[in-house]
Amino acid sequence: MAETLAIVGLASSIITFVDAAQKVISRLKDYWESGRELPKAYANVRNQLAFMVQEVEEMKDEYHRGMIPADKAVRLHDAIQACNRQTARLNAILDDILPAPNDSKIQRGRKALRSLRREKEVAGIQASIESSKSAFTLYYVRHPVCIPIRPKASWLERCCDIPATSVLRFVGREDVLRRLDEIFGFGSASPSDTTLAQPRRAVLLGMGGQGKTQTALRYCRKAFQNRTFDTVLWIDASSEISAHQGIKTILSKAEISTSALEFERNLLAFKDALTSLKRPCLLVFDNYDTPRNFSKIADMFVHHEQVCIMLTSRHHESLRLGTPIHVRDMDQNDAEDLLLTSSGLIRQDVNPNHLAKIVNMLGRLPLALDQAGAYIGKLHLSLDVFEKHYIDKRKKILQYTPDLFEYRKSLSPSAEPSVLSVFTTWELSLEQLGDDRPHLEHLLTLSAFFDHSKVHEALFSTRCTLNFTACSGVQDDWLQCMLTDSTWDSYRFQDIIANMHSLSLLQKFWIEDGHIVFSLHPLVNDWLRTRIGEKDRASMIVEAAVTVAGMDGGPELLYHLYKCLYGLTECAHLLSNDCVDMRPPQKIANGYPVVELVADELNPEPHYWQAKAPCYYRDADVKVKQQAEKGVDGSFYTNLKSSSETESCLSAAILTELADWADLYKLLLQHNRSENLALIRNALRSLPFLHSA
């Protein structure tokens, strides 16, 4: 009779327990998500209840299928009833200690004190619930279901489970390593109780190729060797699937049983294992680059005073997950050291000017420096010879990876890690542009043919205020995603730029006089120009030229004009079999900053030019110096006034690069935008090598 009553009462007790336990879990979760740190006892009991709910829910399914024997039902009923009593006590405690929305500061303070006083009582409740699990264990001996058990201390309590792909020649980033220590409470100053009470999470944020993963690996090895952390665990967070697999692998190494189908069960076991650790633990989520596809990563975080969390990401949305550390270009000395180390060259044997120039040419980007160093070492090049190689074969160099290259990444959840080059890592960012990718990719690529340090919204919005296609012959279909009712929409453009920046495709963006301005990293600029074919590059060069012609006059126009005219000369090389004689003005050939040619005429703010002048157009400077002995004074353009003379001037400038840029700039200011469009268009039409573009 008792067994029959137990079977009948089992269903009711299961429902009561699940409802009460989920209420406790929800209340504690809401409290934690409000920004407050859960005391250890409360966090432990929440995790314990979540595990129990999973087990009891499974029992309910078996009960409805009539699979629970009567003799087992008695023991299970008693165990669940005991859990119900403890859960009721927990809810009563939470009523007493959790602040209500309308509580005053004094009331909240009193409740906080009461929560500390009752922490020991909560720990006793957790122990009581733990003891009830013995009944479940006996049940599952006859009804095998994967039950997580405590890990063996011999592995989890002292392990460094990280990839074996860290570089042996790690250089620099000491500032980032120090900042990680500070965030985790292990800096030079002793961590305060307040610091230790807060969630200790750090986010290494930077564009692809900045060495975020290698910096994280360096920190892990150093922290483990110094016993800052006794447990270091690494999870590939490039996708939700890879993260699930990472947790399952850790459980397997710790000899904790896992479920092949139920990730929630594995996650609870994982959290339970880490919260049982007595010494500090570091949990790393690497390559969290696609928040849109993996929005619930925070559910995998272990909230425990001994567990610190580090993420690496190129996506700015990840900033909200922890304290950000922006991983930027290396400083000059560290960048030079990395290039020398990876190439096998010795500083005393190289020209310091060549070394500095190449490092800046590569944007002080660690991955690019390592690739370039490997290329130099393989071909036994001197730095001055490599400089010429880079100008002529930059695409090949930026795609080159040695056979034993340490930079690797899985490009899909099921794929083996692939060797990563500068080109590969940025292509991955392009893939996240969404449905409008072709149009947004066009915008991004076109921007690389302007002055990359200051690309103004007006370059694109101007095309909507003129009959641009009719004036220039250039199609504007790709602009549709930036229009509303056929009118330029600054807000849509701002959203687009913000999204590109969040993907680390842009270096930065800002608002200037109510308009968006953005910049490209110099190496991203090079990549965008070289990733497309020669015909497409020629078309982009022409489109950039006619776009600049439609701009209002201003100091920035000179830079864009210079870049366009240099680009058109490059275009001649691309599309003509004839050798184009490139003879720059004498002043430019002698290294005279192009900006000073018009500084007196425009009288801009001094700091503007000072910020722009150093090493401004590295590509042009190289070719200018190569042709320095052929310099010709181009001042004969000064007196040109008519439109026909202007067209001739432009054609000659494009073909021979003889133009005095300052005079050409002043010349264009004599005409309005529509006239300039027509002038540029006619000048381009006169060039035979563009007929096929």
Image: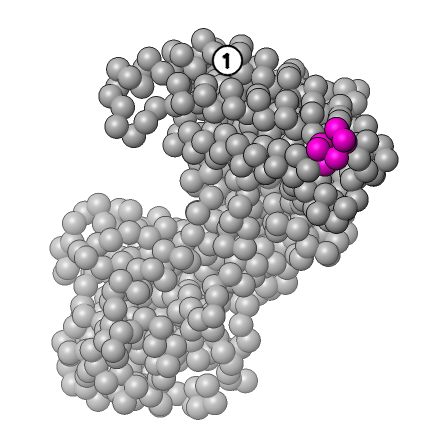
Residue 3 belongs to the span the image colors magenta:
yes
Q: Please, what secondary structure does the residue beneath circle 1 have?
A: helix
- Pointer 1: what residue? 119
**514 w.r.t. 661: above or below:** above
Give the colour scheme of this rendering: one colour
**149 w.r.t. 504: above or below:** above
Residue 244, image x, y percentages: 67, 45
Q: Is residue 336 visible?
A: no
Q: Residue furthest front?
A: 1
- The residue drawn where x is 25% and y is 65% is 490
Residue 516 belongs to the span the image colors magenta:
no
Q: Nearer the viewer, residue 680 or 9?
A: 9
Q: Amino acid at mark 1?
A: Glu
| Mark 1 Cα-neighbour bin, 10 Å: few <14, some 14–19, many ≥20 | some
> Which of the 4 quarters of the picture holds residue 674?
bottom left
Magenta segment = 1-7
Residue 235 appears left or right of 494 = right
Residue 654 appears left or right of 607 = right
Q: Main secondary structure of the magenta part?
A: helix
Residue 9, image x, y percentages: 66, 34
